[in-house]
Image (spheres, rainbow, N blue to C red):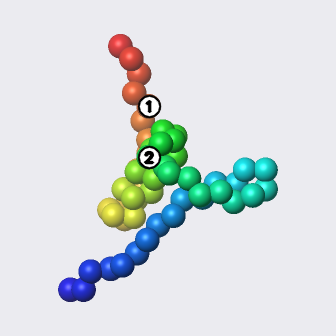
Amino acid sequence: MEKSKYKFNHFILIDGERKQIDPSKVEVISEQCKLLWANLATGKEHILINKVAQ
């Protein structure tokens, strides 16, 4: 099987302008990306659960 050559860029709209971001540096976006990948990889719907300090 041939390896896919996909490149993903992450953008966010700020004041109507599209700006590229690094999702690993923005925690909220990083978690959303992980959720998206989990949904795509398994074909099932997942939810994020916030960790609560005990």
Do the residues bearing badges 1 and 2 touch, measured as CB atoms within 8 Å?
A: no
Residue found farthest to the right? 16
The residue sitting at 36% across, 56% down in the picture is 38
Residue 11 vs residue 54: left or right?
right
Q: Residue 53 placed where, x, y %?
A: 39, 17
The residue sitting at 47% across, 67% down in the picture is 8
Q: Is residue 32 visible?
A: no
- The answer to whether residue 53 is above or below residue 5 is above
Q: Residue 31 placed where, x, y %?
A: 45, 44
The residue sitting at 75% across, 58% down in the picture is 17
Q: Is residue 20 visible?
A: yes
Dot 1, crowdedness within 10 Å: few (<14), some or many (≥20)?
few
Q: Secondary structure at mark 2?
A: helix
Quickly name the residue at label 1.
Answer: 50
Quickly name the residue at label 2.
Answer: 24
**Image quarter of the C terminus:** top left
Residue 29 vs residue 34: left or right?
right
Q: What whole-number distance in Å separates the C-alpha atoms at marks 1 and 2?
A: 17 Å
Which is more toward the observer, 30 or 25?
Answer: 25
Tell me which label, 1 or 2, sits earlier in the chain.
2
Which is more toward the observer, 46 or 23?
Answer: 23
Which is more toward the observer, 50 or 14?
Answer: 14
